[in-house]
Structures are given as C-alpha cells and as structure tokens.
Image (cartoon, rainbow, N blue to C red):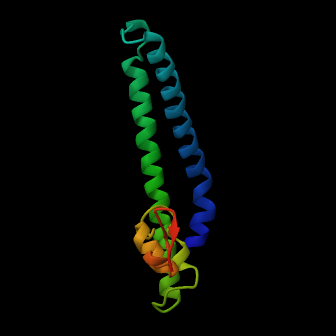
Amino acid sequence: MGAELWLTGTGLTRQQIAQAGRTVFHFAEAYGAAAREQQGQTIPSRLPTENEVGVVIDNAMLAVEKLRDVRDMINRINTDRLRENGGRKGLDDDDTVMYGDGMKQAYSITEVKKRRGVSLSQTCHMGEVRG
C-alpha cells in the first residue's frame, strides 16, 4: 500500500514543493538585489508589498506542509515494511536516514589517530620523527 501512495501521491506534491520553493527563491533573489541597491537607506518603492510577503509566507508554509506529508508517507512505508518483515529490520533500513539524524559524531584528532592505530610517539614532534 505504501509504495502505491508514493507513486501516485508524489507527482502533485513534488510539483507543489518545487513551485513553492521557486516562489520563495525568486522573492529572496529580488529582495536581496533591492537591498543591495539601497546601500543602507530604505527605499520604500523597492520594498516588497504586504501582499507579496503574504504570498511568499503562504508558499513557504505550503512547502513545509508538503514536506511533512512526504515524511509521513515515508514513515508509513517504513512501518509497513517493518510489519511485513515480522518486526525485523530490513537490509536497507540503515540507509534510510539521509539528513543529520543518523550521522555519527565527529572524532577529535586524537580519537582519529587512536582509531587508525597511530600513537603519539610515532608522530612528528618539533621536526623529529619518533618511534
């Protein structure tokens, strides 16, 4: 069921996210150009109108809503897979996290050397190699 939702439901969602994103992007580009021209002084004729700002806010909210819909759809698909596998994780479940949540913490330089098997006595000190 989840895969069918993904195939049939994402066409419109993808278009809506893309269009909303383009609207926000174009607004940011135009407003940024106007701000550069103003050089510290506000030129009222170059400011966006309340209506333009409202349209951008609506588009940003639409993009957020549609992205949440996509996230919910992915969660439903993963839940369906888990249920189909009898509660066992599938082989590709470790690869599903893409942005931030599943990233490992960075190691300090000392930890990296320890993980590589490099001891501090083997490193260069004041131009001299020990070890």
**Vertical arrangement, residue 50 with respect to residue 129, above or below:** above
* Res. 91 in view: yes
Q: For residue 48, which quarter of the picture?
A: top left
Residue for point 48% across, 23% down: 32
Q: Quadrant of the N terminus?
A: bottom right
Residue for point 51% across, 67% down: 128
Q: Residue 46's spot in the image, x, y percent?
A: 44, 11
Query: Of 78 and 91, which appears nearest the observer?
Result: 91
**Vertical arrangement, residue 15 with respect to residue 114, above or below:** above
* Res. 106 in view: no
Query: Of 92 and 129, which appears nearest the observer?
Result: 129
Query: Of 46 and 127, which appears nearest the observer?
Result: 127
Residue for point 50% across, 78% down: 118
Query: Of 96 and 41, which appears nearest the observer?
Result: 41
Q: Residue 24's spot in the image, x, y percent?
A: 49, 33
**Vertical arrangement, residue 106 with respect to residue 52, above or below:** below
The mark tally for this picture is 0
Q: Residue 62's spot in the image, x, y percent?
A: 44, 43
Residue for point 47% across, 16% down: 36
For this view, does 11 lie left or right of residue 116? right
